[in-house]
Image: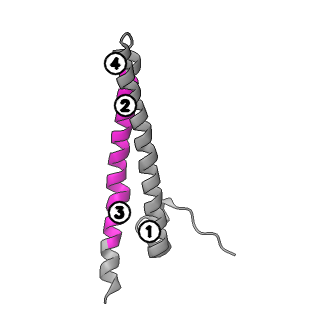
Amino acid sequence: MNLAIIRGYTDAILSIVNFVLVPILMAIALLTFFWGVYKYFILGADSDGDREKGRLFVLWGIIGFAVIVSVWGLVWIVGGTLLGPAGPGMNQLAPPPPTV
């Protein structure tokens, strides 16, 4: 079995996740957070119901950030473990491994 073919697919998948999917999801989480802040402080400043909806948007924005960062970290850990430090983008964003 030719592992170079499989490595090409895994590199492509990890590159798409790291450099396309994660930034899009982070942008959505950031917009959700800012929409909640807007609804809480500006749009619903005089209505308790609107303030509650804004608070929920802020909460879900923060939860989205936590989930995205956690999954992104797991992708880096799995990519570094299975593919070694030469995985896609591993040398671009990760610090070099310590040497003795």
Crowding around mark 3 (Cα neighbors within 10 Å: few <14, some 14 to 19, many 20+) is some
Q: Which residue is mark 1?
A: 79
Q: Distance of mark 3 from mark 4, alpha carbons?
A: 40 Å
Check disc 2 and report its element: helix, strand or loop: helix
Check disc 4 and report its element: helix, strand or loop: helix
Callout 2–callout 3 Cβ contact below 8 Å: no
Q: Nearer the viewer, residue 16 or 62?
A: 62
Upstream in sequence: badge 1 or badge 4: 4
Q: Residue 8: percent from the left, percent from the top? A: 32, 75
Check disc 3 and report its element: helix, strand or loop: helix
Q: Distance of mark 1 from mark 3, alpha carbons?
A: 10 Å
Give the quarter of the figure containing the N terminus: bottom left
Q: Which residue is mark 4?
A: 50
Write the start and end of the magenta stretch as one range: 10-39
Q: Distance of mark 1 from mark 4, alpha carbons?
A: 43 Å
- The amino acid pointed to by label 3 is Ser
Give the quadrant of residue 100.
bottom right
Crowding around mark 4 (Cα neighbors within 10 Å: few <14, some 14 to 19, many 20+) is some
Q: Which mark is residue 25?
A: none
- The amino acid pointed to by label 4 is Asp
Q: Which mark is residue 57?
A: 2
